[in-house]
């Protein structure tokens, strides 16, 4: 074949390192669409908003780019049209720490003790099989409350051996063997099977509990959380009146609203090779360009997400982020569930190992604090469509109603409606135990500050906002500020 002109230019394109990525032409931007800032922050959820607020408080200029129409990430606050009440069904509880108290008091937002409603009784049913309420048989170790309490203490004693887990992923080499075990094996090794019932609900959204690597369970449920929820330590906190979204709305205003926070944004390209980081963004009001000294990535760093924002990935970054797998997690508000307002249902399978229901599926269905509303959480280790999840939730409700005769004869109850529904994927980013053992997290942490880029969020800390903010204060922000 003769090398035609088209063939040659195609070959040149293939050889060019930025093939496929449009490059940023600063000259094509009107001056009023260019934002020159100290830090460009991609993602305005828990970690991105916290960093933006603290940087501004310290006198730095920021621009936050957020895909959604609001700040807050995994916070979901449902505004009930019937009662006017605000109902949190994403993030619901925070630990009572000085970092949490300071953040809320800076915005003059209230916090109150998180309590469970004593009028609600917890019951178990196999949601997939028959939906019939059944008491756990004595063969299930968590049927005995004394054994459950003892296992919580045993968990506390185990996790206390790994104090380094409190702050990010600073793992020793070699990584202690127990941290690499599937959690089911860890439980049997230490005779802690009675934990499984409580942890099925607590370790929500990660995947199948018994198959989850123990490190990730320890990150999700630190000793402070066990102590807070079991009454051994300071109780957890929850929002007052307006829900957690109110804090993020105040943060939006404090940051300078649209001047510094670009909502409904699509990050098109990020270039880090020049003296400044360039972030090209498509917004509802046209294109914008951020020129920043440093970049803070506060989205979940799956390779697909980083490619979506057009980040000029290095070979090293590609190799690290390409190893992540993730779980899938939905939070749902149901109106007219047809279930009693005084029962909280947990999915269980007494024939399965440790009585734990296999996922994908619903973990729990509980009455909300607001009349006629019910909350449910759905987890899958693999991808599922929203339509599949909705259908499974509605079928489960019907099964529970029929099996337990909740539908009084003759009455025609209103059909259940899913009035709040959010897909929180990609949720927990994990790597296999072999990767953890061979130093994955050391390599991940080693990316901090390289190419003017800093990384934050659940993947670097845990899906725990109190922990993310504490880590931001102690680890991330001092280093990031030193680079400015
Ligand atoms: C249902 C649910 C319940 C939870 N309950 C609690 C709880 O009670 N207590 C607790 O401490 N923690 C809870 N968590 C965990 C929560 O604190 C953490 O997941 C936290 O939100 C993680 O912060 P992050 O900044 O890493 O991610 P996020 O908060 O998810 O923030 C990421 C942000 O990036 C944005 N984004 C994504 N892609 C792009 C893109 N391409 N361009 C621009 N922006 C983008 C997202 O819209 C989001 O706003 C819960 C999580 C879920 C899902
Ligand atoms: C949180 O902890 C602080 C300090 O221990 C305490 O003074 C405060 O009352 C607690 N707040 C709530 C709402 O429980
Ligand atoms: C992610 O998990 C799936 C299902 O368990 C598995 O097939 C796949 O290999 C995993 N991917 C990575 C990158 O670990
Ligand atoms: C279901 O409830 C109705 C109305 O309370 C009652 O008449 C009926 O006998 C119940 N059926 C069963 C199977 O318990």
Image (cartoon, rainbow, N blue to C red):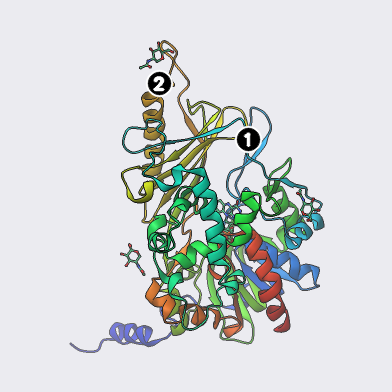
> As displayed, is residue 473 above or below residue 2?
above
Residue 72 seen in the figure: no
The secondary element bearing badge 1 is classed as: loop
Residue 310 locus on image (x, y percent)? 49, 72
**Compared to 443, does 344 lie above or below?**
above
Quadrant of the drawing holding the C terminus: bottom right
**Would you say the beta carbon of the disc 2 residue lies within 8 angstroms of ligand 4?**
yes
Q: Measured from the top left, where is residue 374 in percent x and y?
A: 54, 34
Q: Residue beneath label 1, please?
A: 117
**Which residue corresponds to mark 2?**
405
Between 168 and 71, the residue placed more toward the observer is 168
Q: Residues within 10 Å of mark 1 (few under 14, many from 20)?
A: few
Residue extending furthest left? Answer: 1
- In this view of the protein, which residue sits in the foreground, 106 or 175? 175
Identify the residue shown where x is 73% and y is 79%.
481
Q: Residue at x 40, y 43 (%)?
A: 389
In the image, residue 259 lies at what x, y percent? 73, 62
Give the distance between the C-alpha atoms of the residues marked 2 and 1, in whole angstroms. 24 Å
- For mark 2, give the secondary structure: loop
């Amino acid at each position: 074949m003769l090398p035609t002109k088209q063939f040659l230019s195609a070959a040149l394109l293939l050889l060019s390192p930025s093939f496929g990525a449009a490059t940023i032409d600063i000259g094509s931007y009107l001056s009023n669409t260019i934002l020159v800032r100290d830090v460009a922050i991609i993602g305005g959820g828990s970690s991105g908003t916290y960093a933006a607020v603290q940087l501004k408080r310290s006198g730095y200029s920021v621009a936050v780019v957020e895909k959604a129409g609001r700040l807050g990430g995994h916070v979901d606050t449902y505004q009930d049209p019937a009662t006017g009440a605000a109902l949190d069904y994403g993030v619901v509880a925070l630990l009572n720490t000085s970092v949490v108290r300071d953040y809320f008091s800076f915005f003059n937002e209230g916090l109150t003790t998180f309590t469970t409603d004593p009028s609600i009784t917890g019951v178990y049913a196999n949601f997939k099989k028959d939906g019939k309420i059944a008491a756990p048989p004595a063969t299930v170790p968590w049927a005995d409350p004394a054994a459950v309490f003892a296992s919580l203490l045993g968990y506390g004693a185990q996790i206390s051996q790994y104090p380094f887990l409190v702050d990010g992923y600073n793992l020793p080499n070699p990584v202690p063997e127990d941290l690499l075990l599937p959690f089911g094996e860890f439980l049997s090794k230490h005779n802690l099977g009675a934990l499984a019932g409580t942890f099925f609900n607590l370790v929500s959204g990660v995947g199948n509990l018994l198959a989850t690597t123990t490190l990730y369970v320890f990150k999700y449920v630190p000793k402070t959380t066990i102590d807070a929820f079991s009454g051994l330590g300071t109780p957890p906190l929850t929002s007052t009146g307006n829900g957690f979204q109110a804090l993020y709305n105040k943060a939006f205003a404090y940051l300078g609203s649209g001047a510094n926070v670009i909502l409904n944004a699509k990050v098109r390209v990020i270039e880090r090779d020049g003296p400044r980081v360039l972030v090209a963004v498509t917004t509802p009001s046209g294109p914008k360009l951020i020129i920043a000294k440093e970049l803070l990535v506060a989205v979940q760093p799956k390779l697909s997400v980083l490619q979506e924002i057009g980040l000029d990935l290095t070979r090293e970054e590609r190799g690290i982020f390409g190893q992540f797998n993730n779980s899938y997690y939905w939070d749902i508000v149901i109106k007219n569930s047809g279930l009693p307002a005084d029962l909280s249902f947990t999915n269980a399978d007494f024939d399965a190992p440790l009585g734990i229901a296999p996922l994908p599926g619903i973990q729990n269905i509980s009455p909300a604090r607001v009349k006629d509303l019910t909350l449910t959480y759905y987890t899958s280790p693999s991808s599922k469509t929203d339509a599949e999840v909705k259908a499974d939730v509605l079928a489960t409700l019907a099964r529970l109603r029929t099996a337990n005769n909740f539908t009084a004869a003759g009455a025609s109850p209103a059909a259940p409606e899913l009035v709040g529904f959010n897909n929180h994927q990609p949720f927990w980013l994990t790597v296999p135990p072999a990767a953890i053992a061979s130093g994955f997290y050391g390599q991940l942490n080693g990316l901090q500050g390289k190419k003017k880029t800093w990384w934050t969020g659940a993947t670097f800390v845990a899906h725990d906002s109190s922990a993310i903010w504490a880590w931001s204060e102690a680890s991330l922000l001092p280093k990031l500020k030193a680079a400015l």
